[in-house]
Image (spheres, rainbow, N blue to C red):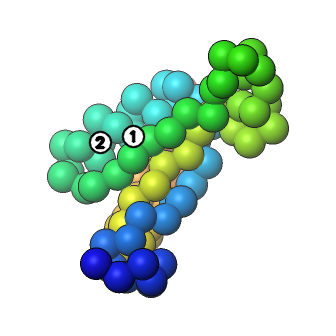
Amino acid sequence: MSNDIHHKDAFITVAVIENVIEAQLLESILSERNIPHRIRSHHDTAYDGLFQTQKGWGEIKAPIRYQTEIKTIIDQVRNDNKNK
């Protein structure tokens, strides 16, 4: 496999995740739709969550070809949460 970041299966950072609830919702939705992804928390016990206040709760990585679909899902999740 090529190391080219434009390769259709190369994982890129798609978005910053705001909190653990959003991460859990996204994990569930993306898994249900069989969309390959990785969710990574920025929490570090040594720094007591310092990086989460600076960088957001975490990030979601996925192949570049899923970027638009995942961003649409994230927007829907965030809009649903705002309307509650």
Asked whether the beta carbons under mark 2 and mark 1 sit within 8 Å of each other, the answer is yes
Q: Is residue 42 left or right of residue 54?
A: left
Q: Is residue 34 above or below residue 7?
A: above
Q: Which residue is mark 1?
A: 26
Where is 20 relative to 5, above or below? above
Crowd tier of the residue under label 1, counting other residues whose Cα lies within 10 Å: few below 14, some 14–19, many 20 or above? many
**Residue nearer the viewer, 55 or 20:** 55
Residue 71 in picture, x, y percent from top left: 48, 60
Q: Amino acid at mark 1?
A: Leu
Left or right, 20 with respect to 37, comes to right
| Quarter of the image where one finds residue 49 | top right
**In the depicted structure, whether residue 72 falls above or below residue 52:** below
Name the element at disc 2.
helix
Give x and y (percent) for residue 31: 23, 43
Foreground pick, 67 / 52: 52
Q: Residue at x 52, y 60 (%)?
A: 14
Residue flagged by tag 2: what amino acid is it? Ile
Q: Quadrant of residue 78?
A: top right
Assign the C terminus to one quadrant of the image.
top right
Residue 27: image location, x then y, percent? 34, 37
Structural crowding at the residue carrying mark 2, measured as other residues with C-alpha within 10 Å and reported as few (<14), some (14–19) or many (≥20): some
Q: How many marks?
A: 2
Numbered label attached to residue 29: 2
Calculate the distance from the C-alpha at mark 2 to the C-alpha at mark 1: 5 Å
